[in-house]
Image: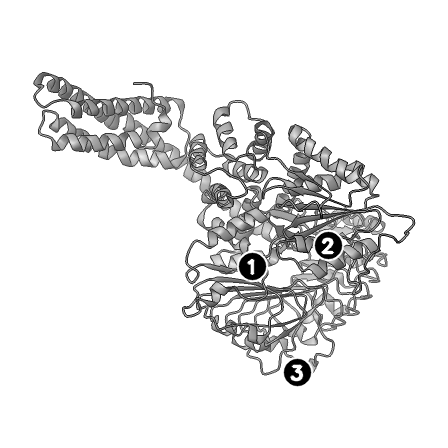
Amino acid sequence: MPDMAVSDFFVGEIATELLKMLFTISRKACTCKLSADNLIETINQLLPTIQEIKYSGVELPELRQRQLDTLSQSLADGLELAAKVLKSSRWNVYKNLQLSKKMEKLDKNISRFLKGTMQAHVLADVHHLRFDTTERFDRIENSNRRLEKQLGAMKIGTGFDGGGWLEEAVKRVEEDHEMFEASCENMGVGFEMGKRKVKEMVLERDDFYVVGISGMGGSGKTTLAKEISRDDQIKTYYSNRIFFLTVSQSPNVEVLRQKIWGWLSGDVHGFTDVIPQWNLKFDIKPVVRNLIILDDVWSLSVLEQLIFRVPGCKTLVVSRFKFPPSTINCNYELELLRQDEAISVFCFSAFRQTSVPFGTNEKLVKQVVDECKGLPLALKVIGASLRDQPEMFWTSAKNRLSRGQPICESHEIQLLERMKLSIDCLSDKVRECFMDLGCFPEDKKIPLDVLINIWVELHDIDEVEAFAILVELSDKNLLNLVKDERAGDMYSSYFEISVCQHDLLRDLAIYLSNQNSINQRKRLLMPRREEGLPKDWERNVDQPFHARVVSIHTGEMTEMDWFSMEFPKAEVLIINFSSSEYALPRFIENMPKLRALVIINYSSSSAVLHNTSVFSNLANLTSLWFEKVSVPQLPSTTTPLKKLRKISLVLCKISPSHDHSSLDMPLLFPRLEELTMDHCIDLMELHPSICRIKKLKSLGVTNCDSLTNLPTDIGDLQFLQILRIYACPNLDKLPQGICELRKLKYIDISQCINLRSLPQDIEKWTCLEKIDMRECPQIKVVPKSAVSLRSLVRVICDEEISLQWEKLFKVLPNLYVQVAEECFNLDWLAE
């Protein structure tokens, strides 16, 4: 019998099969019965150890490996011997006696191993375990202390590297992207040929107004389109007039048209109400070349509405579908990667290099690569999931991949099944967090604060563990961390980081979430925007829905458009819509456990919410996120939201007509700890009752153009640690009472271009760790009392005032002064 590899022994198949044969022999009345019974008892003692080795994934020392190889060979010989016993006639006494002696010898060999060699293994393991346990506990204790410190650093950006380990993850993503771009030149002729052909369509054919890139999901279409947009020759030809716009499967066409017209007309906001119908006969001089890239287009009818046949304007359409020549003048169909190209992409994710490392099982690597069928996304995700795993894990992955069916456009489920391998190897909590990503609309950035908060509420984890999970998913290419265009530099905090995900990975999360019957699912999701709720929801309203997360994505909804539903277990409700008016559903009242409510409007203007009386029944609500809505005025009779800790208002309209006397925020939100108002451009002043919210720890009023002053009583917020008031151009002074914020750790006044000075009594901020005051040109002087800021470790400022801060190095030896570059950038508005 040929030599058996030790990996075959580890799977336990030999011992299990031998055991079956021995039971059969034992039942027969033959001379080998006693030996068979002894062997059964011996192998039953051995099997648990085999299973433990099987699932441990630990690489053994060479000596122990050889000893286990010998045992593996003995078991293999026993399997062959048992087969001979079963075939032997009971009347052949001589042969049966010989076989019986061989069975006895086999039993002695295995018993000797168990009583001798195996005992030595156990003693060695105990010694190693004691040493490893002590070392691991020391590492865990140090790691816990480090994580606690780094979480605080992320929120205020004072980590040793400026932003903590989340910032490190973002930097890794950026570095990987740069390395991947550099490696693209060596990916083979396929990628370069595709790039060359698309460049020809975009540059050399003036008679082509609309050209396309098509290919199946995960084949690298968007990667190629982005490579085209970054190509120096194309950027020069179009004078950097390149506009990249993601369309998605359920777009708001009018908003997209406004964005495109805004780009063509020079209005970067793109909110022009009237879009002219261009006539190609118009003689427009001089002609400005524009390249518009429409990514992820699903519908021909949508595409036709987004094509502007303006002289000098060319449109590159990226889609899974090949549109007809009547719409697309010329199309390049993306081919899947050849083996050498696929190996390069895979190895980059698995080994951080573009070839198989020396000493690695090259045959096994190529087998896994072949099972990815040339799909770049599958290669990246599966490669990342196998990174740093033992060879046995790779073999298991290869076997599971090989059970899939061929991948083509009609086999998307098989593609998802292959991608599922990268999710199966995650821990339970990390897997659940990945599946939560299916709750958000396709091709939209997910606010990091929203995602982290949902994970904390759903999975009984703290923020530290939630951030660790985020970094793990990023390292495995299962999501992308994106720094906001407004972030400026590497010392920005996690508030400027968002999450996005490839459509195919989002589809995978939804596919995994939809395995159970609709009433029993943990997540009740609407994958695409629809006019109303799905029909299968309505057909199942006679039974309660047991979902813990409910995600809705519709157009305008009136109170009559909703139907009654019961959600006794719902803890998170995400409502995405696109309209100017929206009635909240009555079934919110049937969500007694609701803890997080997220309402996001994707239309071009703020929406008016109706039926806000549902807020009176949210006794367990802990966080509230409003985006692009008119904040409703709550009556004084509203039931206090006693558990609400976080309120975020983004791009919201806060009417100045709100009656100050009728609103008592401390009474309504007695436990509020975090309040954020971002891009609320009509906000002129903060409600004075905010200063009486005693538990408030974080206050953010950012990008609020109309804000002219802060409340004089702001110093009453004795627990406030974080104050962010950046990009408020009409704020010209800080109230003197702000110095009474004795627990303040971080203040951000960056881009407050008319702010004239820092407060003179700044020495009262004895806990202050960081000041961000970049692009505050009116501030010319650092107060003398700054020498008393013993806790201050970081200042971000302009070059003109940096020298004054640097003079404090002698008295503040831990201070680091970062000179910031100007970061005014309106590109983010296009999104």
The part of the image, by quadrant, that contains residue 743 is: bottom right
Residue at disc 3, secondary structure: helix
Relative to 469, say whether 730 is above or below. below
Residue at disc 2, secondary structure: helix
Q: Nearer the viewer, mark 3 or mark 2?
A: 2
Q: Nearer the viewer, mark 2 or mark 1?
A: 2
Q: Which residue is mark 2?
A: 306
Q: Amino acid at mark 3?
A: Ser
Q: Which residue is mark 3?
A: 662
| Residue 650 in the figure: left or right of residue 439 | right
Q: Measure how far apart labels 3 and 2 are at the Cα level.
A: 47 Å
- In front here: 189 or 363? 189
Q: Amino acid at mark 2?
A: Leu
Q: Which mark is residue 214?
A: none
Q: Which residue is mark 1?
A: 453
Residue 313 position in % (x across, y down): 81, 48
